[in-house]
Amino acid sequence: MITSQKKVFDDLITLNFTIRNIDWFKKNTSQFDFILYQLGNSSFHFEMFELIERYPGIIVLHDFYLSEATYSIKRNIQPKNNYFLKSLYLSHGVKALNEFYNKPLAHVFSEYPCNKSILNRALGIIVLSDYSLGLMRKFYGNCSPLTIQKILPPHPTRTIHSNQKIAAKKQLGFQEQDFLICSFGYLTANKLIDKIIENCIPLLHSHKNVFLVFVGDFSANHYKKLLRKLIKTHRLQKKVLFKYFTEQKIYEKYLIAADSAIQLRSFSRGEMSAALLDCLAYGIPTLINTHGAHQEIPDEVVFKISNTFTDLELAQSIERLCFDTRLREKLSSHGREYIGAQYHPAKIGQQFHGVMEHFYTHNVNFKEQHLIKKLGGILATPNEKDIQDITDMIVANRTRFGLPKLFIDITILFKKQKNYGVSTN
């Protein structure tokens, strides 16, 4: 296990893997037959972009959009070479560059995945949802199974007994009879936190033992201020609580203590919500809207509302989940069964093994890497012509990832536009 983190808190990882840092990895890449990159749209992953360029491997794409992560490279390791702009152009062309200079950065992030430059280096791509496969087709056309495969993320289940729930509530400062509506994960505007709060206001004011708890960190200070103002305006400082990430054990205690959960989404980046899977694995009755990969969760497993829900629909659904005990029991049971059947780590591990072997045998980029390694042993002192001939052959046999391009030479129009009466603007 290679990571830049100074400490890893997941016992499943620390008990089963040797943890190494990136410097060790760079010195020992020749030891590995496979390199598996877990890549998401986070500035924490900026080092991975350089590693993938130098040491290609199979990429597990946790977020289809990588625009924010790619932009973070500009700030962190390559501030002068315009890596983000080069990647934006390679992925989406001149139109995207024009919008970068003329529209807000947030617009560019939301419209353009900016991921092609890194996916070109992949020796295979694994996505975690059909929604991500759909985005891949939308931006880059139909993709070969020799290049891309879908596998659900591994996720263990957890059986929670009533005495454990009561104990967790008390350890967190609540009473046994308190009802905790929780929402897990990073607190961003695309999680619709303000909508959740607004539509819980009547319920929180009319039931003193109902609490709304957000377990996660803010990614933007202005959104934090907006929510604080909303809570203060409605005098809910003691009923709406924010519990920031401190350590994994606190997060898990809230998963045990929660009576219901709300996990909403908008402007999906192609991710499969790990927080939602946590809720289902712990048997928490969970309310979601049908956005992005959320649509793929079966109806009997979660309480679904429409993607573009109304305030009334959300408020009524929150209250029903709060007061309908039989519904909560059914969702709790079905959620845990679903995760156990579809996301069991042993089952997913076998799928990963099969797909990695499939890429190793059939993926053209893997074959290219094998060829380069073999040539290094055959050609002890290659001359310049040998190198050029081999390079030309390798490039000629590369498969093109993405939609075909048509380049039109308009030089003659530019030179003679006055005679032709044609504008090149």
Image (cartoon, rainbow, N blue to C red):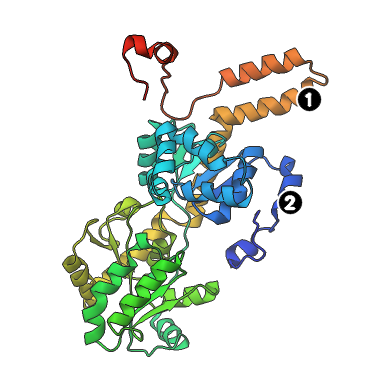
> Given the current orientation, which residue lies at the most extreme top position?
419
Work out whether residue 164 can be spotted: yes
Between 255 and 83, the residue placed more toward the observer is 83
Q: Picture quarter containing residue 4?
A: bottom right
- Residue 34: give x, y in percent of width and height: 63, 41
Quadrant containing the N terminus is bottom right
- Mark 2 or mark 1, whichever is nearer to me: 2
Work out whether residue 259 can be spotted: no
Q: Which residue is mark 2?
A: 23
Q: Which mark is residue 240?
A: none
- Label 2 sits on a secondary structure element that is helix
* Residue type for callout 2: Asp
First in residue order: circle 2 vs circle 1: 2
Q: Residues within 10 Å of mark 1 (few under 14, many from 20)?
A: few
Horizontal side, residue 212 vs residue 58: left or right: left
* Residue type for callout 1: Gly
Residue at 31% in and 69% down: 194
Q: Residues within 10 Å of mark 2 (few under 14, many from 20)?
A: few
Residue at 73% in and 51% down: 23
Between 67 and 358, the residue placed more toward the observer is 67
Quadrant containing the C terminus is top left
Between 157 and 25, the residue placed more toward the observer is 25
Q: Which residue is mark 1?
A: 377
